[in-house]
Image (cartoon, rainbow, N blue to C red):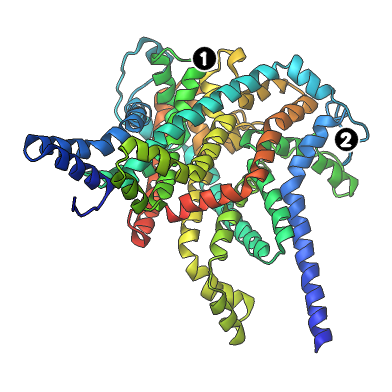
């Protein structure tokens, strides 16, 4: 009897082990292939083995110096930080309004925000291009920042309202009874308690700004010194052959910081996401 | 002070009322309290109205015009009624290429993403804490890879000349010469599918796993005692209690997979040169910015929006039934 159980357990462990191994290969192989190609001197010239025979930093040096990627990284960082700050403030204020106050048109406004979130970017590219042009902000980072704040706002409001609603009203009332002003209560009671949610939404607006492609391509098309990292990659593609060593080195520079960050905050991220998406 | 406290707004009202006495002061305090949510909402609403709602109205207006490069420069209007819609809907390309590419791909991608994500979530709940962290981190890596760089990596993996897939297949003797995966419509979308599933399943896995951890252990054990196998236990206990989680996950994935753009546009031939791989989003973009037919492109974008709006309405109805807003 006990031998039978042990045999079944061993078989189960083997099956689970094989599944985990397959899963790890599927999830990690593209990242491995990107990073290893970035260091492989043979990546640019063509054929390479599964494991690089030699290591080189040449691709990175080329990409950062001659490819202008240092500038693109700076542009992207500037845009992403500005977007995070603006959309954090705007979506926090708005989410307090919809989570804490009952007022006319509240439900219809929430519905509108939800619907707006579903509108495809492709539908907005054309009018936003015209809009940004009319504001004389084409080929500027400011134009792009405004656009990204707009597209990350609905998601931020929708997600943060769950966190604001989770803060017990009694705490706020206690602060008022102690004679605190509304602003004082907001700063010292509400803000610290919704911080985890604010961090999670900020991560998502950062990622939106860091990765976004279609608006950047359309609105910065005429000024290559203003490129963000996502569109800066395009220049390593040639008419007939692609400089895969440089493409993979630049891709590694873009992706690796995000990956490391995701792994560090994975617990917070997933709980924040679930709180926003499911409890909503 | 003995007032019944209901909400911060009510507290604010009663406090200023008590301080200022009855009459016009009190009325003013009520007005301020009523205005407060709108003051908080104002900045976000202004931004959304100027840069989301107005553009949405504008895309409708453009779609009724012959809006080309001349009009975009001069600002003139040139209304042609529903001609753009008629042209889009009577274009054989829509029915034979664009719509099948969009819809079949979205259905396949949603099914694969949700099934794989769910299986991974179940697998993860069966792992020790250490291995759960390892698998969780690997999933985060797949998730964190931006769509743009992810697409380039898959293009490099399937590259016609030096890609690892062609080399492995030739090395194994399964192929004699390199195959160009990107010229054939089916193999093109197979790569898009792998790319989108790889990027999209982590969200499903993490969300479903969080849900799974909340499923009653007692009920599962009781069912096991009664002799229910793992598959029956999943469909009779786990799935019903996670229904809301699955609804959210499936509908969000549907919306994302209908809108796939970069993953198609950035692949060889995906930016309009190979018309057999167009989908609704890319078609709209290519007509607008490639052909300078912004009116026609807008009409296609409106059609895509309508499809997604129908899905959104279903989403809201399901959400509203489970939990009032």
Q: Which residue is mark 1?
A: A139
Using the image as rendered, state which of residue A119 and residue A172 is in the foreground.
Answer: A172
Image spot of residue B297 (x, y percent): 44, 28
Residue B132 drawn above or below residue A32? below
Q: Which residue is mark 2?
A: A48
Q: Residue at x 85, y 45 (%)?
A: B168
Using the image as rendered, state which of residue A136 and residue B8 is in the foreground.
Answer: B8
Residue B223 in view: yes
Tell me the chain of label 2.
Answer: A
Tell me how far mark 2 sits from mark 1, CA to CA.
Answer: 39 Å
User: Few, some or many C-alpha atoms within 10 Å of disc 1 (few <14, some 14-19, many ≥20)?
Assistant: many
Using the image as rendered, state which of residue B145 and residue A189 is in the foreground.
Answer: A189
Residue B92 drawn above or below residue B206? above
Label 2 sits on a secondary structure element that is loop
Using the image as rendered, state which of residue B39 and residue A31 is in the foreground.
Answer: B39
Label 1 sits on a secondary structure element that is loop
């Amino acid at each position: 009897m006990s031998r039978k159980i042990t045999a079944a357990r061993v078989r189960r462990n083997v099956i689970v082990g094989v599944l985990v191994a397959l899963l790890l290969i599927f999830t990690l192989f593209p990242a491995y292939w990107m990073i290893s190609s970035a260091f492989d001197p043979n990546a640019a010239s063509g054929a390479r083995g599964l494991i690089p025979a030699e290591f080189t930093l040449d691709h990175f040096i080329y990409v950062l110096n001659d490819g202008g990627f240092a500038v693109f990284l700076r542009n992207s960082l500037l845009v992403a930080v500005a977007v995070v700050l603006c959309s954090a403030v705007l979506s926090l204020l708005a989410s307090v309004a919809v989570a804490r106050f009952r007022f006319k048109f509240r439900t219809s406004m929430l519905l509108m925000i939800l619907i707006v979130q579903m509108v495809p970017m492709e539908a907005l590219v054309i009018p936003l291009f015209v809009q940004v042009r009319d504001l004389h902000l084409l080929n500027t980072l400011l134009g792009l920042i405004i656009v990204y704040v707009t597209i990350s706002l609905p998601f931020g409001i929708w997600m943060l309202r769950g966190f604001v609603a989770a803060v017990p009203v009694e705490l706020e009332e206690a602060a008022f009874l102690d004679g605190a002003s509304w602003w004082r209560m907001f700063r010292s009671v509400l803000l610290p308690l919704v911080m985890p949610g604010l961090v999670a939404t900020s991560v998502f607006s950062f990622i939106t700004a860091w990765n976004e492609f279609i608006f950047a391509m359309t609105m910065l098309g005429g000024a290559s010194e203003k490129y963000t990292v996502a569109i800066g990659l395009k220049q390593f593609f040639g008419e007939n052959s692609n400089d895969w060593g440089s493409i993979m080195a630049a891709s590694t520079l873009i992706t690796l910081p995000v990956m490391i960050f995701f792994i560090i905050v994975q617990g917070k991220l997933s709980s924040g996401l679930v709180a926003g998406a499911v409890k909503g | 002070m003995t007032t019944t406290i209901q909400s911060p707004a009510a507290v604010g009202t009663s406090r200023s009322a008590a301080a200022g006495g009855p009459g016009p002061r009190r009325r003013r305090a009520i007005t301020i309290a009523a205005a407060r949510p709108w003051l908080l909402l104002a900045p976000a609403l202004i931004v959304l109205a100027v840069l989301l709602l107005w553009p949405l109205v504008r895309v409708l207006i453009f779609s009724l015009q012959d809006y080309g490069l001349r009009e975009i420069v001069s600002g003139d209007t040139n209304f042609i009624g529903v001609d753009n819609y008629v042209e889009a809907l009577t274009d054989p390309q829509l029915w034979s290429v664009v719509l099948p590419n969009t819809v079949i791909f979205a259905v396949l991608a949603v099914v694969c993403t949700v099934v794989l994500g769910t299986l991974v979530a179940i697998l993860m709940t069966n792992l020790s804490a250490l291995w759960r962290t390892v698998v969780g981190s690997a999933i985060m890596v797949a998730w964190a890879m931006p769509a743009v760089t992810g697409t380039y990596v898959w293009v490099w993996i399937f590259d016609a000349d030096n890609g690892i897939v062609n080399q492995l297949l030739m090395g194994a003797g399964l192929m004699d010469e390199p195959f160009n995966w990107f010229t054939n419509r089916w193999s093109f979308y197979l790569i898009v599918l792998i790319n989108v599933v790889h990027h999209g399943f982590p969200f499903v896995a993490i969300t479903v796993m969080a849900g799974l951890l909340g499923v009653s252990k007692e009920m599962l054990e009781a069912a096991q005692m009664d002799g229910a196998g793992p598959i029956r236990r999943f469909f009779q206990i786990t799935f019903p209690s996670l229904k809301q989680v699955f609804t959210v996950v499936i509908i969000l994935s549907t919306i994302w997979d209908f809108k796939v753009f970069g993953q198609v546009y950035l692949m060889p031939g995906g930016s309009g040169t190979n018309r057999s791989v167009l989908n609704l989003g890319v078609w709209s973009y290519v007509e607008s910015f490639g052909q300078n037919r912004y009116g026609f492109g807008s009409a296609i974008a409106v059609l895509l929006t309508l499809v997604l709006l129908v899905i959104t309405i279903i989403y809201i109805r399901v959400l509203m039934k489970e939990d009032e807003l």
